Each structure stands twice: as structure tokens, then as C-alpha cells.
Amino acid sequence: MQLRFNYRLDPTPGQRIALARAFGCARTVFNDGLRIRQAAHARGLPNIKDTDLQKQVITAAKQTPERAWLAEVSSVVLVQALADLHTAYRNFFNSVTGRRKGPKVAPPRFRSRKDNRHTIRFTRNGFRLRPDGKLNLAKIGDVRVRWSRDLPSDPSSVTVVKDASGRYFASFVVQTDPSEVLPETTPEVGIDLGLTHFAVMSDGRKITAPKFLRRANRKLKKAQQALSRKAKGSNNRRKAVARVAKAHARVADSRRDHHHKLSTTIIRENQAVYVEDLCVKGLARTRLAKSVHDAGWSQFTAMLEYKAARYGRAFGRIGRFVPSSQTCSVCFVIDGPKPLSVRTWTCEGCQTTHDRDVNAARIVLAAGRAESQNACGGTVSPPV
């Protein structure tokens, strides 16, 4: 399977200028291509082919005085910017026609130089890894990389990212080795995600919610207040914006690190992992929105899913309408809905006292096992 490996970059001042130039050229090519396609659609013309759009936006544009500066950056960056436009339109059309599952995809929008995140992508003919560990980018030079771990194989492409806090990252796309599959083990686990306890396991373990955003709320508040007092367009306001972005980046990095460590531990210890398919978007519209976003459930479950596929484990999502908080995990009698203030309850059928969250995790595990048996060809109903 293909995975991304991210590393921090340390470009020199001259390389930062070259990267800014590449970001701007890629943004211009993307916007020019989008403008041409929108104009063709408004006039009722057929869709422009990718090769024709590339000749018009890149090849012919370099010969004009208005776009002659496009030749200052690598052509690989410009071609990949148009490829991103084609992918955005393809996803939009597939979403409209129903060929793409999931939430609806909006049509592509114009990119702005004021965006918080800027990216460019290089394919194999636009970058190479030097023996001394530096990353050579076409028309940018050898950029120092902070190698926190080795790449499992040769990368097929690299995306250079500049985030809102001014940090630079290199995101390599690599093909993982099938030998990374872990040996089989016996335990299986169901996970109930929450706010007081981030994760409750079916074996009774409880992971306390770290609440990174809540803990950093005081520093963020002071940074936002300082930003609000700066004059718009001033250098001091630009510095204050960077300080706020760095504070938010620290929170996001801490949350991501926690999710990576916890998901790796769960995948290594269990052969099968089952979670409830929560409607995070719906919960984010309630009064608990800040806590829901701070928990980062979607990011955590996505990590569990791809790590399970990478290491040869089973992963399943249980329907959100399974009454996990109402069903007894011993006799499976539905005891009815209960308010959130009720944390322990006694089953009316078997008189077993349950912890609400642990019982829900066990129901998730039981439902996941039932779904896996059906998916593997088990008998859904007895024969006639």
C-alpha cells in the first residue's frame, strides 16, 4: 500500500525565496486553468482536454510577456498544479453523478496567496535524494531534511508544504513492504470513543482525554487578544498572526502525536479492532463542538484503519444506530435509552451492573464480530 512520510525541511533564505516563487507560479497556473475551464463552460463549449489546457496555460503562456516568469520554476511543478485541477474536477463530477461515495464535493475554487497552506509537488524527474541526506529539488537546490526515520522504499513523488506557522515539510509517497505484516495474535477489542475518556476498551481499560486545546486555551486567548490590538497591514500584526498559528500548530502536533502512539499500540496488541461510526459533523454542530473537535475522533479512526491495513490486522466500523448504550453485553437485552448523567446501570434481565462506557465497547466488539462473520461468507439466516 502507498503511504506518506512527512519530514521537516530547513531551507536557506535563498531557497525560501525560490520556494515562494514556485508556490506563486503553481497557484497562477492553477487559477489560469480554472478560469479557462469556467469560461468554456459558460459559453457552452465542450470540456477542454488536459493536454490542450496544458499547452495553452503553460507552454504558450511562457512565450508571452505577461507569463514569461513561469520559466523561472521547474515545469514539473506547473504540470502537477494542472493535474491537481483535473483531479478536483474529476472528484466533483463523480460526486455529482453519484460515482463517488461520501459527502458531496464542491467544484474547485481559485487559490489565493493569502491562503494559510501552500503546496507544490515534484515527481521522479523533479527531485532526488543526495547521499548526504539532502533533498535536491529542481531549480531550488539541495534542501536540508530532518530525517526522523528511514524511508521504507524509494519515493515516487514528494510534496513540499508550507503551513500557516511558516514551517516547511516534505511529504514523500512510498510503497510499503508486505513484510511489515505483524504476526497473528488472539485478542480483539472494541472501542467506545468519548469526551471524558477519549477511548474505553472492551477489556475495561480507559484512556483519559488529553484535551490539548483546552489546556492551551489560556495561551491561545492571550495570543488572539494581542493580535486583535495590532493595526491591519502592519508588520507587528503579521508577527502576531504567526504567533497564533504557531500556538495552534503546537496543539495540532501534540494531538497527532498522541493519536499515532495510541493507535500503534492498539493495532500491535490486537488482531481485530472495531469502532463505532460516529457522525462527527453532526456532533460538531452541538454545544459540545469545541470538545468534539479537540478530541479528533476522525483522525484517530483513520489512523487505526490504515495501520490495520498496513500491519495485516482487521478493522471494522459499527453502524452509529446500534444501541450500544442501551443493550446489555451479557444477555443482550435492550434496556432502553438513558440520560448521559447515568454512568452505571443494572440490567433488568440478568441483574448485571454495567459501566456505561465499558458496556458500550463490549457491544461494539460483539457487533463487529458478527459483521466480520457475515462478511467472510457466514450464514446470515438458517436454511429453509
Image (tube, grey):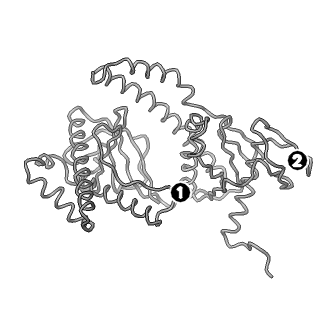
Nearer to us: label 2 or label 1 = 2
* Quarter containing the C terminus: bottom right
SS under mark 1:
helix
Write the residue at 32% across / 55% down: 84
Task: Kindly check if marks 2 and 1 are in contact, taking CB atoms under 8 A apart as contact.
Answer: no
Residue 43, given in percent of the width and then of the height, sits at 23, 62
Q: Which residue lies furthest to the front in this view?
A: 43
Q: Is residue 205 left or right of residue 143?
A: right
Residue 174, given in percent of the width and then of the height, sits at 40, 55
Write the residue at 14% across / 58% down: 59
Q: Residue 179 carries which label?
A: none
Residue 195, given in percent of the width and then of the height, sits at 65, 37
Residue 223, given in percent of the width and then of the height, sits at 43, 21
Q: Which of 100 and 12 is in front in this view?
A: 100
Badge count: 2
SS under mark 2:
loop
Task: Please tell me which of labels 2 and 1 falls first in the chain.
Answer: 1
Q: Is residue 21 left or right of residue 246?
A: left
Q: In this view, does 76 lie to the left or right of 286?
A: left
Write the residue at 66% across / 56% down: 319
What type is the residue that disc 2 sits on?
Cys
Q: Which mark is residue 347?
A: 2
Q: Is residue 311 above or below residue 355?
A: below
Q: In the picture, residue 294 is in which quadrant? A: top right
Callout 1: 10 Å neighbours few (<14), some, many (20+)?
A: many
Q: In the picture, residue 365 is in which quadrant? A: bottom right
Residue bearing the label numbered 1: 310
Q: Is residue 248 left or right of residue 329?
A: left
Per the model, the C-alpha gap separating discs 2 and 1 is: 40 Å
What type is the residue that disc 1 sits on?
Arg
